[in-house]
Image: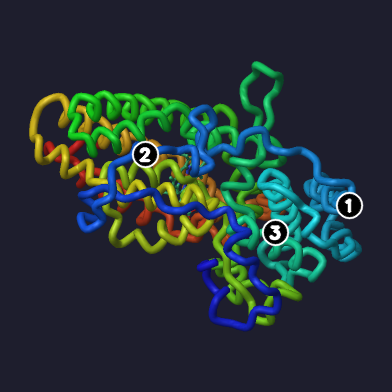
Amino acid sequence: MGVDGVTSVKILRRPVPPSHRLERAPQQQGPCAAPSMALPWRPFSLSAYHVSEECGFILPAPQTELPTYYRPWMDIARSVPQLVQSHTLRSHVHQMPLLESHFLEGHRELRLAHLALSTMTMGYVWQAGEHGTVKVLPRNLAVPFWDVSQRLGLPPILTHADGVLANWRKKNPEGEILWKAELRDAARGYGVTSSGGHVFQAIPKVIDGVWAGDSVGVSQALEEIAEALHSMTEALKLMHEYVNPDVFYGIMRIYLSGWKDNPSMREGLVYEGVQEEPMEFSGGSAAQSSLLHCFDELLGVQHEEQSAFLSRMREYMPPAHRQLIRDIAASPSLRHFVQDRAGGPLLDSYHRCVSRLLVLRNYHIKIVGRFITVPAAQARQLRSQGTPGEVEALGKAPTSLEERGTGGSGIMSFLKTVRNRTQETCLTGPAPFQ
Ligand code: HEM
């Protein structure tokens, strides 16, 4: 799988053969990427990447039920919030039968199973807060979770692909999307900005336009992307409307946290019946959303110092989405194309895209300030000066995550460097910091 801790130690479960995974053959590369491959040009198509023009990366029509055999999973998964509240989730998991995962069929069924098993896992690990974690995930949860993860090519932990992309339904046939589960409110904001939607018609137009040397077509498609980036920033503002920072920071965040780069679980987690050694996996983060990775590759934003973390986050995406990012990266360089035709509307459109991406990243930094930095400072102050009731109200807010994201990054320095690299991508002098 290529995620930390998996390859170097003894595996008790056999990995699923690659033919059972939902990988996709790479798109043919363009002449700028690999001049030696003199293959004929064919249009860049999104259909093979599990990406739809309507839903983007969001899983269309996610399944809501598994076959009856899996009822014990679904019953517990649906009650995780109540069972965590009553501190009985772990005992329910211990009583759960060890089910075979091979009766699961098809991508959507597997995604629902992954969502259910990951929800139980996060609740199981964090039920008693950061000081009451476990070292072992019991066999009846670990073994099927591992098998389902292998078949999907996802890590055995809650990912953005679970909590956001596969965790929604429509309020009514024509209605807006409603994100479900306890992550509902935050997921709503994440989902709006992570899906991509119509921008997916524009990405192939840019790549094909560069191939064909069509400056006008590329410029028009870049305008569509710039518009989409603007809409994403507007959607990000919904976080203030839908998400209460105290609830996000004090209650929800710990359940997104992982067991890599997390001082609360320095040794990782043993997946009983899978591997004798502990494994480490990062928690769920929007850094695992494929959309900004696509934009970075398309526009030529180079992340150097931060690339290790961002590359690792790609291991937490569905393989087909990961492949899309790789294929965009291997396409002829848009940035060079714009540079070669310096000036005019093409340069303006490119500059508008980079500027809008910069605005989005700046706004995201503000969000992180409000949802993490400010509550973390308040929590520190309450711990030193607050009444017992106030300190209790901090609940399970993890002190170990005050300086870290749920993905495990050192938050502000990471995000500011990513933002600065975006700014340096501009070809016309510095884009505005807003
Ligand atoms: C409560 C709201 C949010 C908070 C507190 C938050 C926090 C963070 C943190 C701490 C990171 C650093 C990586 C890590 O360790 O996890 C991060 C990265 C990231 N977040 Fe968010 N985030 C929020 C909402 C969103 C939304 C709605 C999006 C959708 C656009 C988003 C997109 C990203 C991306 C793409 C990264 C990777 C860095 C980059 O490419 O700029 N975040 N976020």
On screen, 67 above or below 230? below
Determine whether the beta carbon of the residue marked 2 sits less than 8 angstroms from the nearest atom of ligand 1.
no
Q: Which residue carries the number 3 mark?
A: 148
Query: In this rendering, which labeled residue sits more in front, label 2 or label 1?
Result: 2
Residue 376: image tag: none
Circle 1/circle 3 CB separation < 8 Å: no
Residue 36: x, y in percent? Answer: 22, 58
Residue at the extreme top = 174
For this rendering, which residue is in front, 399 or 382? 399
* Mark 1–mark 3 distance (CA, rounded to whole Å): 15 Å
Residue 115: x, y in percent? Answer: 70, 49
* Mark 2–mark 3 distance (CA, rounded to whole Å): 31 Å
Helix, strand or loop at disc 2?
A: loop
Name the quadrant of the C terminus: top left
Q: Which residue carries the number 1 mark?
A: 69
Q: Is residue 203 visible?
A: yes
Residue 254: x, y in percent? Answer: 63, 54
Kindly identify the residue that appears in the image at 76 percent across and 38 percent down: 64
Q: State the colouring used for the structure image.
A: rainbow
Of mark 2 and mark 3, the one earlier in the sequence is 2
For this rendering, which residue is in front, 112 or 49? 49
